[in-house]
Amino acid sequence: MSGVAKKPDDLVITRIFNAPRRLAFQAWTKAEHVSRWFAPRPLTMPSCEVDFRPGGAFRFVMLAPDGTEYPFEGVFREIVAPERIVFTGAVHDGNATVTTITFAEHDGKTTLTMHQTYTFESPATRGAKAGWTTTLDQLGEHLERL
């Protein structure tokens, strides 16, 4: 089946943050927080809109050092505070994603699990693990500043 992109495996990453679940969840809820951490290094996020409610949309533009823009937009499908966020998204290459973020608290720390599915394999999906890893590093740094 040449010419047909194969479906990639789901991506699952688990991280433990030295912050209570309430705070870790809150970092996803407002553009003022999301714009500070939700982009893989060295990208920045000059444009960030977040309507944090079921059915609410988000729109980001991530900016690479060379000036290339990477838009990402989607819709919050499910929000169960402070336990779970599910959102759909469209990556710049037309790939559709479904991402589930779960938050569990143990001894004042938060275990965050990110589970993401994609429509097809692409350069964006091949780089997703590295991208999410640095993005979650930045979330950890942001939580330390709160």
Image (tube, grey):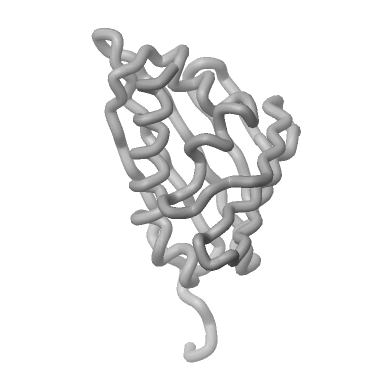
For the C terminus, the image quarter is: top left
Query: Which residue corresponds to the image point at 68% horizontal and 49% vertical from the top-left?
Result: 73
Depth order, front residue of 73/7: 73
Q: Is residue 54 above or below residue 127?
A: above
Q: From the top left corner, tell me how far across and down residue 60 is, in percent.
A: 65, 47
The quadrant where residue 136 appears: top left
Query: Which residue corresponds to the image point at 33% horizontal and 43% vertical from the top-left?
Result: 13
Q: From the top left corner, tell me how far across and down residue 139 is, in percent.
A: 41, 33
Depth order, front residue of 71/108: 71
Residue 133 lies left or right of residue 7; in this view the side is: left
Query: Which residue corresponds to the image point at 68% horizontal and 45% vertical from the top-left?
Result: 47
Query: Which residue corresponds to the image point at 44% horizontal and 21% vertical from the top-left?
Result: 24
Extreme residue toward the bottom, this view = 2
The quadrant where residue 91 appears: bottom right
Depth order, front residue of 68/84: 68
Residue 25 lies left or right of residue 35; in this view the side is: left
Q: From the top left corner, tell me how far across and down residue 145 is, in percent.
A: 40, 21
Q: Is residue 71 above or below residue 120?
A: above
Q: Is residue 52 above or below residue 146?
A: below
